[in-house]
Structure formats: C-alpha cells, structure tokens
Amino acid sequence: MTTDIRIALIQEEVFQERLRQVKGESYSPEHERPLDDGDLAMAAAAFAVQSTGQGSGADILWPIKSLMPTYPTRRARLIVAAALILAEIDRIDLERAAV
C-alpha cells in the first residue's frame, strides 16, 4: 500500500470519528461554540498524551469537568485527538465567520 493510500485511509478514519462525535455524541459545532478557546485542543492534547502511556499527564490536561474517557488502543486515542483538533479548527472558523 502506498503512502498516499495509507494517509487517505487515516484521514477517512479521523473524518468518521468526527462524524461520530457530532452525530452519535451530539457534539455539534453549536454545542461546542460556547467552550472556552482551546478546550477542544486541550482535550486533543490529553488524548495524545494518554496515547504515550503518561496517564497522569493526560488527566492534568483534560479541560472538561466530566471524567476523561478511555479508548482501547494508542491508535484509537490518536484518531480521537485528531478529530478533536478538527473540531477546534471548525469552532475557530465558525467564530470568525460570526464576527
């Protein structure tokens, strides 16, 4: 499998995870808009840190009052982190468009 195909497959997984967050968990852009600047990025960072096995560092970064969810594999945590980064970028873009 070529690098281009592997990257495209990973992009699709990140996209599907973001859709799951929006449709399955009701984390729509409207729901996320009131979050503080950087909350979604911090959540993404927490998942990325958690993927390294540094669980206590992830807990410190977690910006949301609820418990930080866990995912079964390092790769799954990184997919979720990437989807949360997309969510933060989308939130920023929507905020700019509203001004």
Image (tube, rainbow, N blue to C red):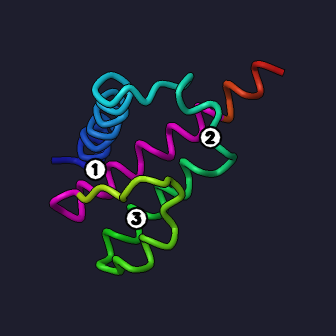
Name the side, left or right, on which 1 lies relative to 51. left
For marks 1 and 3, give the CA distance: 22 Å
81 or 33, which lies in front?
33
Residue 26 sits in quarter: top left
Q: Is residue 45 left or right of residue 50?
A: right
Q: CA distance from mark 2 to mark 3?
A: 20 Å
Where is residue 87 drawn, in percent x and y?
A: 51, 37
* Residue displayed at 39% across by 80% down: 56
Residue 30, image quadrant? top right
Q: Tell me the SS state at disc 1.
A: helix
Q: Is residue 99 above or below residue 2?
A: above
What secondary structure is marked by label 2?
loop
Seen at 15% across and 60% down, the residue is 72
Residue under numbered circle 1? 3
Find residue 86 and report its horizontal and vertical position in percent. 50, 39
Q: Position of residue 25 (x, y in %)?
A: 32, 31
Q: Is residue 51 shown above or below 28? A: below
Instruction: Tell me the tag on residue 48.
Output: 3
- Viewer-proximal residue among 19 and 8: 19
Looking at the image, residue 79 lies above or below residue 29:
below
- The residue that appears at 38% across and 61% down in the rendered structure is 47
Asked if labels 3 and 1 touch by Cβ distance under 8 angstroms, the answer is no
Q: Which mark is residue 35?
A: 2
- At label 3, which amino acid type do we have? Ala
Splitting the image into 4 quarters, where does residue 76 fall?
bottom left
> Comparing marks 1 and 2, which lies closer to the viewer?
2
Q: Answer with mark 1 or mark 3, whichever residue precedes in sequence.
A: 1
The segment highlighted magenta reads 71-91
Distance Cα–Cα, label 1 vs label 2: 36 Å
Asked whether 18 falls inside the magenta stretch, the response is: no
Viewer-proximal residue, 73 or 61?
61
Under mark 1, the amino acid is Thr
